[in-house]
Image (spheres, grey):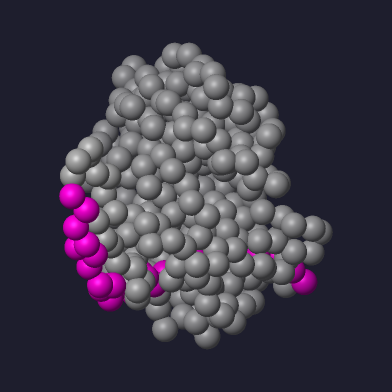
Amino acid sequence: MRGTCATWLLLGLGEMGCGFSPSAAALSDGQAIVDTAMPDTPLPPPVARWIVAGVTTTTPGIVVHPFAGVFGTPCAKQTSPSYAYRTLLTRNDSTYVYGVESEFWGFGLGCASVDSTMVAGGGPRPIQRIVLDSTTGVGFFTADGALAIGVYRFTTASDGKPTIGGSANAPSAAGALVFDSAHAALYMAGTSAVYQYTLVGTQLTFPSPGSNVAAPMCTAPVDLIVSGDSILGFCSDVPGIRHYVRSPFAYDKTINGLGATTQVVALPNDMAVAATSSPSSLVVLTLNNGAPTLSSPVALSSSVTAMAVSEDGLVLVTAQQKDASNAEITAWSVSGTTLTKLATEPQAGTITALAITKPGT
């Protein structure tokens, strides 16, 4: 599916043959019409990206979809390691990706092969998340551990390969996770509770056991987002956005207007996109330092099962299940609070996670 010239220009993509004509501007009464149309000027080709999908069919794995405004031929499915990844996270503007399910993995992606590194983790949970502080190379992920362990710390080498470096107790069924880099704080939500961890030192180690601060949460949290001095919580079991103040950490109120969500991703410039479930839609949020406003929803035919955004915030990808055996990936341009569909791509199986990376070979 090809986008319009306006869409390409908003994306910073561009395509051959997209030009502009100053004579198309509005004219005031009595103004002479002068033909100053410019000839079409070749523009740079669309920015190439890789859309990485964690999928389940007979054998789970990873499929890489080249994308440059339109989808290219998918790369070969990577069936080793074969897990249904709950989430995928890219490393800066690179082809390196982290994934978690019953184990924690680092992937150096290629179109025909994958260089994988596995480190011990816990068991899978319905929702799992990964965060990474690019400045220190320290990250965190959620997984089901022994007793109350639910969040793990990892460090990364210069090539991206991870090493586990600590763990901490978590709320029951904890999965949602966000890192507040400005205040070296980690927030994690589980059943009916969200924890704040004030991390220690330049290496962001966990505080002493029991020193986390707890606040109430819904029963089925989906994700957390930092907005200024506020933390916003999104839920799949109830509508509204849970609002928390950072210092001292506490639940403040519920902001109404947004339905129950299945996925949420943060955008640059204090914005986000939420996928709601009833009705199924996409909603762009302007977060306003913790006082979010909602754009008009974009109606969808079914709920979003996975979602990701490019590092520059210009391309959003969503996954929807079309039937028991087939899913579909949709790419959207993001311009302010406007989402414009660019292209769709079928994918066999169920898509459990998405990420967008720079293209590799």
Residue sitting at x 46%, y 80%: 110
* Secondary structure, magenta segment, majority class: loop
Q: Nearer the viewer, residue 84 or 296?
A: 296
Q: Is residue 65 magenta?
A: no
Residue sitting at x 53%, y 72%: 71
Q: Nearer the viewer, residue 73 or 160?
A: 73
The percent position of residue 318, horizontal first and vertical second, equals 57, 54
> Where on the picture, by quarter, is residue 354?
bottom right
Residue lying at the far right of the rendered structure: 324
Q: Nearer the viewer, residue 52 or 79?
A: 52
The percent position of residue 305, horizontal first and vertical second, equals 64, 50
- Look at the image and tell me whether residue 167 can be seen: no
Residue lying at the far top of the rendered structure: 253
The percent position of residue 215, horizontal first and vertical second, equals 49, 20
Residue sitting at x 61%, y 28%: 259
- Look at the image and tell me whether residue 109 can be seen: yes
Q: Quadrant of the image for the C terminus?
A: bottom left
Q: Is residue 53 magenta?
A: yes
Q: Which residues are magenta?
A: 32-58
Q: Quadrant of the image for the N terminus?
A: bottom right
Give the side of residue 149 with respect to residue 9, left or right: right
The percent position of residue 322, horizontal first and vertical second, equals 74, 57
